[in-house]
Image (tube, rainbow, N blue to C red):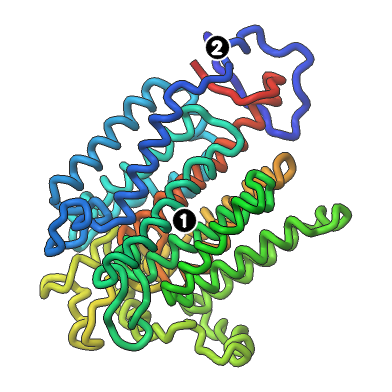
Amino acid sequence: MNRPLTLRSPRARPQANPPADSRGWVPDSRGSLFAALMVWVLIIYLAVPIQYFSGDMNLNNDTAMGGPNPIARAIKLGLLACSVVIGLWRSRLAWFELKSLNPFFLAFVALVPLSALWSIEPSTTINRYITLLSIVSVCLAFTLLGWNRTRFQDVVRPVVTALLVASVIFGILHPEYAIEIGEGTLKNSWRGLTDQKNQFGMLSSFGVVFWLHAWFSKEKKWWIAFPFIGLSFTCVLLSRSSTSLLATILSTLFMLLVMVAPSNLRRFMPYVVSSFAVLVVVYALAVLNVVPGMSMLLDPVADLAGKDMTFSNRAVIWDIIKEHIQLAPVLGSGYGAYWTGPVPSSPSYTFLSRMYFYPTQSHNGYLEIVNDLGFVGLTCLLGYLVSWVYQSLQLMKFDRGQSMLFLALFFQQAITNLSESTWLAINSAFAIAVVTLATFSLSRALLDQRLRLYFRAPGALGLR
């Protein structure tokens, strides 16, 4: 293309005479397998502890690719380099993609490196930012090659399923590594090929969502989808993660509601989705106690459930984190700078003396963001969630099936983060990869709709 294009909104009418240079937009599947391989390598490496790759079970876990391990550095820098090459190759399309991306996600990516200026551990913040940048760059590169309507789930669903199948086999052959030996709720809970039970539960929850969506949207026959739905849900139960179970049930109920809603009621779906999203955000803010007294609104729900508002009695952890937040409430203590390990130099070392164990995370994604990036970061997070719902509802006008998948993942993660930390949390880096991939795929789906409208092109589009 020799002249810049102004992309029109999906509501705009197509031009009577499309631009003469529309030949520049053509179906293009070059490099699609390579991009898929990059995503598979990224997710597998982030989900599986480093010791399983090296064969040395005495190594420290480094699934987040943030430490000095040479294998971690090689994979991280290799993926980053490949992604940069792809971005330069498809630079025009990459520019359009970034312009349509969730703006608050871009704010997050910009705020993280800036936090090194006031971080309590600047080197840790920068190191983990490079990890985050490698994830973001792979997700951008993925949407630039071989894009089609179902590309997101066609690539992510197989690798999630493979990890679950491998985890079951691993658990049968090596239960000493795949099954927890602890006490209480940890005893006999499965962690599979992941580092701990909650991560395995989250991975299994992804499996349920992707396979149930495949059946709902008729991408897979029932006799293919149902066994994998059963496998994934069984893994959720084996993990004994109450958070993953709750997130799985509510996200699948949401998909069922969208799919079975009569056509005359579908126009009310945006209101249903928005109301559900508001409830989740209100619960998150109540846990954070942003508005004093807000928790009273949820006391009846807690009484009916027979549980406290944490669902897992993590209030002590949250109280300690809130005490630390008071030291830097506006900008936080720096991305990833708090959880640097059970060492005396780390402020998180206090957990050993006050709780006699080291939790490694805040067990609340919203609280984790405030601790790392302050209330400025929380504002970015809330804006990101609102934009995610808004973009999904925009896509629903053209593609209800794909919109349903993105909304189901939104609710799954929004609920999960009420008692686990996955929003940009390096300790759950494979979840960051899936969520970031969904963020880019959602924006790419909307971009395709605009381009089809602009060029009146019926098929998948690519830019040479």
- Residue visible at 71% across and 46% down in the picture: 400
Q: Position of residue 426 (x, y in %)?
A: 31, 58
Q: Which residue is more in the foreground, 198 or 337?
A: 198
Q: Dots 2 and 1: beta carbons under 8 Å?
A: no
Q: Position of residue 257 (x, y in %)?
A: 73, 62
Callout 1 secondary element:
helix
Is residue 254 visible in this depiction of the protein? yes
Q: Quadrant of residue 83?
A: top left
Q: Quadrant of residue 74?
A: top left
- Residue visible at 31% across and 52% down in the picture: 46
Q: Looking at the picture, which amino acid does disc 2 mark?
A: Arg
Residue labelled with disc 1: 380
Residue 351 relative to residue 302: left or right: left
Q: Which residue is more in the foreground, 239 or 20?
A: 239
Residue 448 relative to residue 81: left or right: right
Q: Earlier in the sequence, mark 2 or mark 1?
A: 2
Label 2 to label 1: alpha-carbon separation: 34 Å
Above or below 101: residue 420:
below
Is residue 390 visible in this depiction of the protein? no
Q: Position of residue 201 (x, y in %)?
A: 43, 67
Q: Position of residue 26 (x, y in %)?
A: 58, 16
Crowd rating for badge 1 (residues with CA inside 10 Å; few <14, some 14–19, many 20+): many
Crowd rating for badge 2 (residues with CA inside 10 Å; few <14, some 14–19, many 20+): few
Above or below 178: residue 44:
above
Residue labelled with disc 2: 3
User: Which label was assigned to residue 18?
Assistant: none
Above or below 330: residue 404:
above
- Residue visible at 47% across and 82% down in the picture: 310
